[in-house]
Image (cartoon, helix red, strand yellow):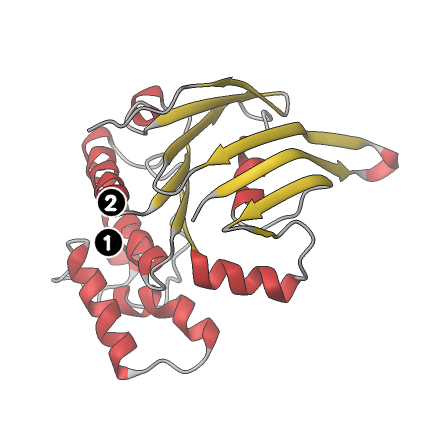
Amino acid sequence: MAARVIEVTKEYRLGGGVIVRALRGVSLDVPEGDFLAIMGQSGSGKSTMLNLLGCLDRPTTGHYILAGQDVSRLADDDLSEIRSRDLGFIFQSYNLIQQLTVVENIELPLQYQGHVTAADRQRCVDLAKLVGLSDRLDHRPTQLSGGQQQRVAIARALVNDPQVILADEPTGNLDTATGEEIMEMLKTLNRAGKTIIMVTHEPDIAAQAHRTIRMRDGIVEYAEPYRVRA
């Protein structure tokens, strides 16, 4: 599933008529199977870009083409369907529900869609085992380490078998060794055909992607050529 951003701008209106221009005419191609790292200082526009790519927000002007469809002006319900069907999300803060078990957290996107079958529940168990949590199925987030919580978040992102995974600082709250484990998981998913788009401020993490773009003041300041890495 290829993604293309064409001359996209994003403006936010604050109190007193102040306008913040978060993106200023950005164009970007993300081919199917890419592993893209987005870097930039705070306020550079990288998080805004990730939100647009994840259909969590719309551009003010310009176009966002996802799998051949211009999703720039779709209704909220249509964007919600795309997010649940085609996109998976991994967040720095994990965003797990503290009252739910590992399996129940993985199951959450399916709950939002309605009835969860026995086969769905087994898939959640299988995903928990896939990310190395076979002995933690009934544990709650407070009983897990940061790395284990991020593994739950990765399994949750995979439950609908999305084509694109968007990761916002996926190693930001982890120690170096655990961060490398999470990166190995993302690289394995990418080798299996998933497109990965990752925001990070860590150069050593970005260096493990196929390519890196750097953002500054709402524009793409630098785009590294595509290169497959181990």
Asked if the residues shown at circle 2 and circle 1 are in contact, with their CB atoms under 8 angstroms apart, the answer is no
Q: What x and y, as percent, mark residue 6?
A: 63, 35
Q: Which mark is residue 147?
A: 2
Q: What x and y, as percent, mark residue 99?
A: 37, 67
Foreground of the two, 21 or 65: 65
Tell whether 85 sits left or right of 218: left
- Look at 23% across and 47% down and name the residue there: 192
Q: What x and y, as percent, mark residue 172?
A: 36, 34
Tell whether 25 sits left or right of 139: right
In the image, residue 51 sits, relative to residue 82, either above or below, namely: above
Amino acid, disc 2: Gly
Tell whether 6 sits left or right of 122: right
Q: What x and y, as percent, mark residue 175?
A: 25, 32
Task: State the quadrant of the C terminus.
Answer: top left
Which residue in the rendered view is the most extreme toward the front?
A: 68
Q: Which mark is residue 144?
A: 1
Amino acid, disc 1: Leu
Question: SS at mark 1?
Answer: loop
In the image, residue 152 sits, relative to residue 217, either above or below, namely: below
Which residue in the rendered view is the most extreme toward the top?
A: 222
Classify mark 1: residues with Cα within 10 Å, few (<14), some (14-19) or many (20+). some
